[in-house]
Amino acid sequence: MSTKDRISFIALGLVIWAAGTSVYRLTGSSFFEGSAAGYWLNVVITGILYAVVSLGLMKWRKIKQKDWLQGAICVALPGMLGEIPILAGFSELMSNMQPETAGRYAAFLFGGYSTLIGVAWFMSVKASSQATSTTRFVGTDQ
């Protein structure tokens, strides 16, 4: 993966984080303070969309699958770091939600980032193991 690709994915992660944080700043109470079913639906759908969009962009940009974990970390890291001050000042910064909602919001974030990184890790390992299994070694009877 090139430096240009890494920078592009870091910028993408920053944009996704800023957009998502803005949306939840305005409408978060309906996602996090409603029913348990609605909350979990949001967690699952957002995690899947985050992984599909990010990995789809890597595929579209022709990033080798073995490098997808690296790309996923570049996408996720700006948001993970950006959420530190948001969660530390949750009551003031996310004032449309109750302070008690910070735990649900943090769990939601953890779910999204871990889904992206986990799927990318799985796909990277799969690609690396396939490349290793197709390599022929000198002096073997294959």
Image (cartoon, rainbow, N blue to C red):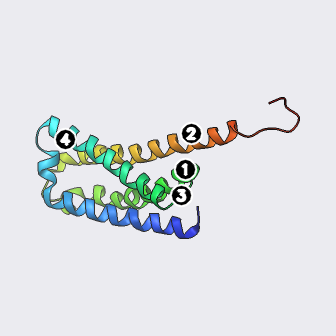
Q: Secondary structure at mark 2?
A: helix
Where does label 3 land, which residue?
Answer: 63
Where does label 4 land, which residue?
Answer: 39
Nearest to N terminus: mark 3 or mark 4 = 4
Q: Is residue 92 left or right of residue 130?
A: left
Label 3 Cα neighbours within 10 Å, binned few <14 / some 14-19 / many ≥20 = some
* Label 3 to label 1: alpha-carbon separation: 6 Å
Q: Is residue 46 left or right of residue 129?
A: left
- Of the residues shown, which amino acid type is indicated by label 3? Ile
Near-viewer residue (42 or 106) = 42
> Residue at left 57%, top 68%?
3
- Of the residues shown, which amino acid type is indicated by label 2? Lys
Near-viewer residue (45 or 111) = 45
Where does label 1 land, which residue?
Answer: 65
Where does label 2 land, which residue?
Answer: 126
**Residue 17: image location, x then y, percent:** 32, 61
Q: Quadrant of residue 38?
A: top left
